[in-house]
Amino acid sequence: MQDYISLRITPNPCSEDITDLLADYLGEIGFESFTPDSTGLTAFIKDNLYDEALVASALEDFPIQSEFSITAEFVKGENWNEEWEKHYFQPIIIADRCVVHSSFHHDVPTSEFEIIVDPKMAFGTGHHSTTSNMITHILNLDLQDKSVIDMGTGTGILAILCCMKGAKDVTGIEIDPFAYENAVENVRLNGCTATMICGDANVLSNLKPVDIFMANINRNVILEDLEKYASVLKKNGIMLLSGFYKSDIPMIENAASDYGLCLEEVKENEEWVALRLVKSN
């Protein structure tokens, strides 16, 4: 079981823009899961990858003037579910149709779709705006008998919802081995038949074109791999993209147009967006 470092950063002043930027900067140096709140950000990285000097260097280049209070704590892998239960993950209802909770929760609200997620260190509990925006898009789609790829599946939450909505062939792809194992476990918890693959966008060349392609990652990765994404999307297929800000839409839309992808709808929450694009004939 992988051990982690929990890094708590308390900026002064603190704002949502600052915690979002902190997550971006820390993501560039190996941090893979983030829990923002009103006073700062808790970020997690595999203990063998933690480098205090890299963190200090990242904060030196921070574009918003702020003072940072930093503490680091070792978190054993087997205690991770207990940490989520005590501190972070609470049940959430999205779009009044989907409730996301963990196996340790009780008195869970009833909803049309009920997803069980034991997140461990993987990203994607529905609490972040990018995930909830993607879920809202999925809830509005007819997925009966559709084929789906979920790139960067994290906890597997989006792939699981697609299965619940009737998709017949769902594949989740995750580059991080530990997150991949977590996604496999969550698929099992929900009684779904989604296939999980550990790998990056290069594995797409081995897959058949699908009706729906999803990627909730970040702007830079999406721009780098967009051609590969488009190559496995059928004509008239739908692509859902998230992990970036409203201000990034023109850049994403311009790149998408090179591959016949036309922007049709935007879901927005707290400046984070999720796009629905369609691949033209």
Image (cartoon, rainbow, N blue to C red):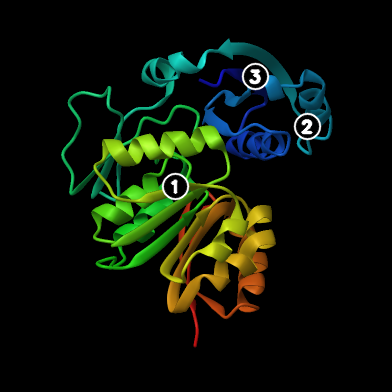
Crowding around mark 1 (Cα neighbors within 10 Å: few <14, some 14 to 19, many 20+) is many
Pick the front one: 203 or 272: 203
Q: Is residue 77 above or below residue 35?
A: above
Distance between the Cα atoms at labels 2 and 3?
Answer: 29 Å
Q: Amino acid at mark 1?
A: Thr
Looking at the picture, how far across and down is residue 31, in whole percent? 64, 31
| Among the 4 quarters of the image, the one containing residue 41 | top right
For the residues marked 2 and 1, what is the alpha-carbon distance in whole angstroms? Answer: 29 Å
> Disc 2 or disc 1, which is closer to the eye?
1
Residue at far bottom of view: 281
Q: Residue sitting at 69 percent across and 16 percent down?
A: 70
Q: Nearer the viewer, residue 37 or 160?
A: 160
Give the structural element (helix, strand or loop) at label 3. helix
Q: Answer left or right for 237 relative to 167.
A: right
| Secondary structure state at the residue bearing disc 1 | helix
Q: Of marks 2 and 3, which one's residue comes earlier in the chain?
A: 3
Tell me residue 224's x, y (percent): 69, 60
Q: Position of residue 86 (x, y in %)?
A: 38, 15
> What residue do we see at 32% from left, 68% from top?
146
Q: Name the residue carrying label 3.
A: 47
Residue 269 appears left or right of 244? left
Q: Earlier in the sequence, mark 3 or mark 1?
A: 3
Q: Residue at x 49, y 72 (%)?
A: 233
First in sequence: mark 2 vs mark 1: 2
The residue that mark 1 highlights is 131
- Read off the residue under disc 2: 65
Q: Amino acid at mark 2?
A: Gln
Between the residue at mark 3 and the residue at mark 1, the CA separation in whole angstroms equals 26 Å
User: Could you tell me if residue 177 is visible in this image?
Assistant: yes
The disc label shown at residue 149, or none: none
Q: Amino acid at mark 3?
A: Asp
- Is residue 273 in view? no
